[in-house]
Amino acid sequence: MRLIVVVLLILLGLIVPISTLRAAPAADPNDVQTAWRLLDYVAVDYEGAVDRGRIKSASEYAEMKEFAGSVSSRLAALPIKPERAALISGAARLQGLIVRQGSPQEVSALAHGLAADLLQAYPVPLAPTAPPSFARGEALFGSTCAACHGATGDGHGPSAAKLTTPPIAFTDADRARQRSVFALYQVISQGIDGTAMQSFADLPSQDRWALAFRAGSFAFSDEQARLGERLWKADAALRDQIPDLKTLVGLTPASLAGKLGEQRARAVMAYLRRHPEAVIEQAPASLSLVRQKLAASLDAARKGDRAAAKGMALSAYLDGFEPVEPTLGASDATLLARIEGAMGEYRAAVDQGAAPDDLANRVLVLNSLFDDAEAALAPNASSNASTFLGAFTILLREGMEALLIVVAMIAFLRKADRSEALPYVHGGWVGALAAGLLTWVVATYAIGISGASRELTEGFGSLFAAVVLLSVGIWMHGKAQADQWQRYIRDKMTHALSGRSAWFLFGLAFVVVYREVFETILFYAALWTQGNGGALLAGAGSAVGVLGVIAWAMLRYSRQIPIAKFFAYSSWLMAGLTVVLAGKGVAALQEAGIINIAPIAEAPRLSMLGVFPTWQSITAQLLMAVAIAVGFSINRREGTEARDLAPAE
């Protein structure tokens, strides 16, 4: 009885805080954002109202007092939290400082500090879900903002003279250094009361972000942007200071100048506000994009927009996680498999209309896995030993499938005394290596390879190879049933290995090798960026050596196997690889969003064998297995019939 009471007390202690938290009302994001925007506005514009303890502009000073009072009232209306009292006290100090006509430096520091504390206590979305298009921002600014703010952002548009409150001049360097992109986004979203600046909340969020980046770029020159690009690409420590879009949009040039110096800070801001995508591209170890897109997917699901939720979930994988997959696979393949499976299950749950709470729990689990992934991807997590082992196992794993198929084809041609067809097979795998090198050059220096392109290449390549191997395996199994090999080779092989068939062998060798080379290149490119190039080359060389020994042994001992047994063994090898590739092909197309996902609970995930816990991939493998069984059965029946008729000949 005492033990039961203790357990009940523990459960009560756990349940009460949880129920209390659920009962607490959530802050309205609009109220929080409005208070934040007012604080930012006061921090930046107060110096236009007061200078050295004297009022410069009575109208602007009255506006500052009004805005500070509005901040206090909005903070008092927020849901009760331990931090709220300190925020209200800080707002009162801000009001008093403005009434006393304090210095702009004091007001700016207090207002910016309050704004930061407000967002920490009442978090609201602070960044775009993806890098905004600067070109889109330029077009929108020209059509919606240039009439007042001017085509160059100088505040002298055709309609500016008609306005009581002059439009902001975005070219004003002093004002621009105090203003973040997030602050501009807030003004664009909500407008400014008492001025001609209206709200553009009817625009999509991504368009408002594009406008904010464009408006925030006018104060910086193209020359500064070019300098900023050189600094950004050359300085890894600098890139670490701005790891994601959330950091970028919340950063003011003034705060960055405190770390880099004025000239460098302005140059970096000039570049990044024109090219926000550079933040995402520079740090593949950062999983901020995948987190943002999953959050957007969950938000869409809560609003009942299943199509948008599914699209964002797919983008989270292809655009957010796929770029870091090779690096993570090289350092922790088990964690990679867990994340792939969990993200697939999340997409399936979205597609099946799961409850938002269920989806939210899945996102929490994924975020925990992403924490582990970021730790594994950290620069200090890579050592010479781990790089060597990663390079060795990747090449050995990816090369084995291709090696088995190509060596079987070479051994077959030698057995059949058709050495004239060998150049086609060798040309296929050598051509695949050359194409792989070209792929590496393109992926590294030119256009890059998107997650969807990678999965489609792997998926369709695997399915094509599986279909071809199915026919080859059944054909080889059929020939293993024949008795008169010499007559078969003499009478049939000329037709079987005609010019068309030789090019068929070339195509098969090319596809199976290129598929593995394509995968290996992506993993090696990711490992190379971590440094330890010597260890990587040593691992690759060791794997090539092992693969060479395996190939030599297979070719040598295949000559000692009677031809009927050789064909029988090869047919079973082809059959097994057919089933493996079918599972891998379907799984890759599921990750690309081409095929839906129906998870199988508690099913194992054995990617080396092409076994993935979804009904679609398992069904594809079962269909291949059935086709193999039927083909082999027909071969055995025909072989039996041929032997029965042999004496009559």
Image (cartoon, rainbow, N blue to C red):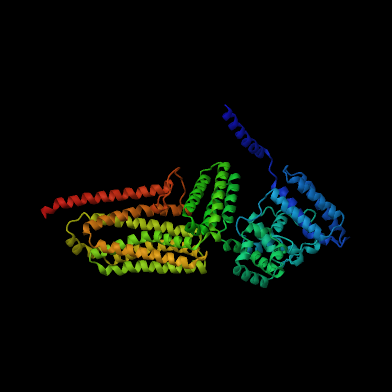
Q: Quadrant of the N terminus?
A: top right
**Left or right of residue 42: residue 602:** left
Residue located farthest toward the bottom when viewing the structure as drawn: 223
Q: Is residue 592 above or below residue 177?
A: above
> What is the quadrant of residue 357 in the picture?
top right
- Residue 172 shows up from this direction: no
Towards the viewer: 631 or 290: 290
Residue located farthest toward the front when viewing the structure as drawn: 2
Residue located farthest toward the top when viewing the structure as drawn: 1
**Left or right of residue 326: residue 151:** right
Give the percent coordinates (x, y) of residue 41. 77, 57
Give the percent coordinates (x, y) of residue 540. 42, 65
Towards the viewer: 496 or 362: 362
Towards the viewer: 151 or 119: 119
Residue located farthest toward the right when viewing the structure as drawn: 54
Give the percent coordinates (x, y) of residue 208. 67, 57
- Residue 279 shows up from this direction: yes
Disc tally is 0
Q: Quadrant of the C terminus?
A: bottom left
- Residue at screen point 65% across, 72% down: 227
Give the percent coordinates (x, y) of residue 32. 72, 49
